[in-house]
Image: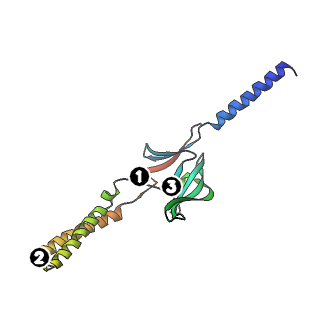
């Protein structure tokens, strides 16, 4: 064999290896959650995603591929179960691949950390505790439960409890995609 032939084969193998590794490490498309024009969260292949499907079912999975207008993901379920000693451990179940269009994503969980202040739980807890202690103290001290002064206090506490209940009913733990929020696929190549 000639030296020219060996150099040509060597150059061809290096070129194939270079473009193969370039393609293997190239960036893929991104799945992006946007609020109007600002990006809230981004997912790439290998990311864990949790969303509400168009059938209102919550689905969790690992994104395998992001393509033109759809994603391919491996559905999983992560649960806490007791082990053989009775202690809590994490168990993962895989349900196979699922291909879905981006428009089939109905909602995303909220990343809201001020929940106890906005969902009314603090108001319900405080007013419920006040009503309970008021009734117990009235019975212990043998005072009239529904005297005019005590009825006013119980009425105000009941109103605060009702306000907390209304706040809890109006507080959503997820965002629905539509006018304000939307999912997009950004092509990086």
Other-residue count near label 1 (Cα within 10 Å), few / some / many at <14 / 14–19 / ≥20: few
Q: Residue at x 47, y 50 (%)?
A: 182
Q: Position of residue 68 (x, y in %)?
A: 60, 45
Residue that carries the numbered disc 2 in the rendered image:
148
Distance from Cα at disc 1 to Cα at disc 3: 12 Å
Query: Would residue 34 appear left or right of 186 to someone viewing this image?
Result: left
Label 1 – label 2 distance at C-alpha: 45 Å
Residue bearing the label numbered 3: 50
Secondary-structure class at tag 2? helix
Splitting the image into 4 quarters, where does residue 94 fall? Answer: bottom right
* Residues packed near mark 3 inside 10 Å, few (<14), some (14 to 19) or many (20 plus): some
Disc on the earlier residue, 1 or 3: 3
- Rendering coords of residue 23 (x, y %): 65, 36
Circle 3 SS class? strand
Q: Are marks 1 and 2 in contact (CB under 8 Å)?
A: no
Name of the residue lying farthest toward the top: 3
| Residue contact between numbered discs 1 and 3, judged by CB atoms under 8 Å | no
Q: Which residue ends up furthest to the right in the rendered image?
A: 1
**x and y percent of residue 30 in the render?**
54, 43
In this view, 23 is above or below 65: above
Which quadrant of the view contains residue 95? Answer: bottom right
Q: Who is closer to the viewer here, 94 or 137? A: 137
Looking at the picture, does residue 1 appear above or below residue 74? above
Density class for disc 2 (Cα within 10 Å; few <14, some 14-19, many ≥20) is few
What residue is drawn where x is 53% and y is 57%? 60
Q: Is residue 162 left or right of residue 140?
A: right
Q: Which mark is residue 111?
A: 1
């Amino acid at each position: 064999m000639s030296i020219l032939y060996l150099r040509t084969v060597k150059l061809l193998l290096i070129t194939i290896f270079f473009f193969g590794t370039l393609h293997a490490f190239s960036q893929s498309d991104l799945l992006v959650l946007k609020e109007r024009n600002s990006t809230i969260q981004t997912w790439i292949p290998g990311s864990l995603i949790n969303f509400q499907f168009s059938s209102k079912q919550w689905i969790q999975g690992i994104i395998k591929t992001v393509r033109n207008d759809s994603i391919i993901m491996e559905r999983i379920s992560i649960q806490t179960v007791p082990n053989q000693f009775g202690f809590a451990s994490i168990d993962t179940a895989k349900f196979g691949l699922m291909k879905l269009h981006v428009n089939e994503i109905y909602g995303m969980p909220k990343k809201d950390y001020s929940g106890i202040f906005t969902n009314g739980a603090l108001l319900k807890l405080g007013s419920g505790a006040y009503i309970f202690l008021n009734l117990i103290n009235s019975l212990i001290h043998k005072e009239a439960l529904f005297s005019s002064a005590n009825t006013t206090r119980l009425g105000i506490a009941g109103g605060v409890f009702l306000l907390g209940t209304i706040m809890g009913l109006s507080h959503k733990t997820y965002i629905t995609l539509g006018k304000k929020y939307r999912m997009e696929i950004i092509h990086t190549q």
